[in-house]
Image (spheres, rainbow, N blue to C red):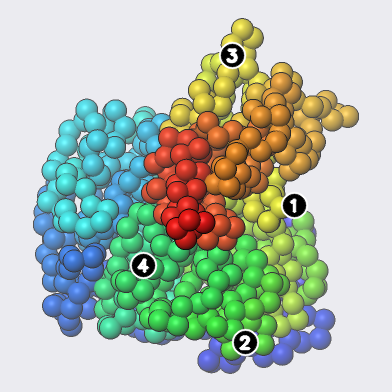
Amino acid sequence: MTQPMTARTPVPTTASGTRLPASQGSLSIARGAAPATEGTSGVLARFEEWTRRSPEAPAVIDGAHRWTYRDIDAAADEAVRALRDRVRPGDLVGVCLDRSAALVVTAVALARIGAVYLPMGPRPGERRTEAVTEDLNVVCLIGDPEVLPPRHRSAEHLPLALPAEGANATATVVAAFAAPGSTARSAPSGAFYAVLTSGSTGRPKAVAVGEPALAAVLDWYRATSGVGPGDRQSLLIGVAFDPHLLELWAGLTSGAPLVPAPDEVRWDPMVLADWWQEAAVTVCVAATPMVEPLLERPWSPDLTLRHLFVGGDRMRRRPGKDVTTTVHNAYGPAEATVVSTVHTMRGSDDAAGTDAAPPIGHPLPGVTVVVADPDGRPVARGTEGELLIGGGALALGYLDPELTARRFRAVPKGLDLPGVERLYRTGDRVRMSDDGALEFLGRLDGQVKISGVRIEPAEVEAAFEKDPSVLGAVVTAPRTADGHTRLVAYVRPAAGTALTADALLPAVRAWLPEQAVPSDVRIVDAFPLDANGKVDRAELTRQAAAGAPGPGDAPADGGGLAGTTPGERLVLSAVRDLLARSEVSLTESFTGAGGTSLLAARLLTVIEKESGVRLRAPELLRQPDLRAVALLVDTRLAARQPAGA
């Protein structure tokens, strides 16, 4: 039980949000400025206001295709007419579309109906989708019928006349209706959207967010970026990732057009920079791992990008003095509506260009943060503790009431937090400086974050253990030499079975988001045990961090670099370093060896840095094996040699 406590009044702020000096002996409590008062309009109402004010202004620009606010408004009305007899206010609707005008129309239509938008992405994984629609009372899935799970492919389909043009568009979209499970959970009253997060049971859990919470974050975003007519707002983030809601509605509520990014832009930082320039993007939301390689290079002075909001992973360096874009290092769990704290950086800052990790900053307007000890008591500033978040930006809770009760707590008696009724326990370890800024230090529990997605190793273990040939699985999360986290799975086969990573991974991918698929799978006869007879996870993590092969594993070439050409040596060395797997050979494909489109971006950067050869992500991912990738490098190296050299 949490003990009663007392605390000083949180650090006061002026009306403009400037924080006043902390009182002597201040505890680790900080409050953002008072929320902006822009009227009582909600998220949908702001879009409709812009539709009335500027009906012919562009709302979506996708290459050569454009849709005005009037176009999106009319298409959304048509979708409402098609769905309204089957979808009611409060119903959960799973959306399996990619970034496109069709996705934008769907989001507006569901908001008009009052249904709860559940973004799942265009390829959410068949088994994962089945689990979600069994556990949650999802009335229908909207998407290409070819990517829906079997139960929904054979269900009743209602065709939807959504825009079919654009880089990520699909020609056919249906609403597929299938009966939910008998114990499926519904969204709580007042939910505007829900997003999936990792669950330790092996099945994803869902968190529901109300419209006022999203509206408050959007108010901050518009005020901070100044986004409005004449700007171009990115539509870049993966659809199943909660910052997608921020950028989608930021454009629609500001009068600025949304610019959907082609899929390859999300795999390759250099393509991302080219796209910013070609699409004239002025305000962008992006994942930290995609942006950091760009901060290590000379910044293009030709970019129109004014504001760049990054988050989802620890930022390891600050922008250089040549960066003309204002960069916002944003932090926030889905349970606190996308963004809770932010630290803003400019090229003119004294600390610009330093390798020191920036803080995650100060709380947004209306947000209160507390750094607490294991008993929930605020600690002194400068002391490490768990980050607790309160205020109007909190989610309504999980669709599982028991989980909500564990993670969302009432403010303890004796703790004076005006305007705060609940605190969300993030599980993140932080430290607050004297001026109220937060420094992110890591996780307190077993969760890890891979490319912005929180992952429970237990969920990954459960995905392996669904295979009857698997006796048990343990997943570790070591850090690579450059500070990135990767997943390594140790799998024990059942008696009489012969398992390989190639045989296991296709089924595992059907259960998990891409970020949760391990880059290395090791087949072992037994797990090491600690003195208490439990699996020694620390020892497995040490082995994985050291790149030690599991029992019975051996490098395909004895550990040396079997490549005979410069391209083969470079590609093999780079892939082994990125995956921390010394046994990778040139006969393996990049994805078969454990690579993902997210790791592809880092591999492309290494290849260009070491050889000067610029490959594109699609070129890398469609090659049958690493030898073919190396041949591309060798061919382009040879083409640069002068004749007769």
Q: Is residue 365 visible?
A: no
- Please state the total of marks drawn on the protein image: 4
Sequence order check, earlier mark of 1 and 3: 1
Residue in the image at 29% along x and 37% along y: 147
What numbered label is drawn on residue 1? 1
Disc 1 versus disc 3: nearer the observer: 3
On screen, residue 352 versus residue 404, left or right, reads right
On screen, residue 262 versus residue 241, left or right, reads left
Above/below status of 438 relative to 322: above
Q: Are marks 3 and 4 in contact (CB under 8 Å)?
A: no
Sequence order check, earlier mark of 3 and 2: 2
Sequence order check, earlier mark of 2 and 4: 4
Residue in the image at 60% along x and 79% along y: 320
CA–CA distance between discs 1 and 3? Answer: 49 Å
Q: Are marks 1 and 4 in contact (CB under 8 Å)?
A: no
What numbered label is drawn on residue 498? 3
Which amino acid does the dot numbered 2 rest on? Answer: Asp
- The picture places residue 61, in percent across and down from the top left corner, at 23, 68
**Which residue is denoted by mark 4 in the rendering?**
275
- The picture places residue 252, in percent across and down from the top left corner, at 28, 71
Tag 2, which secondary structure?
A: loop
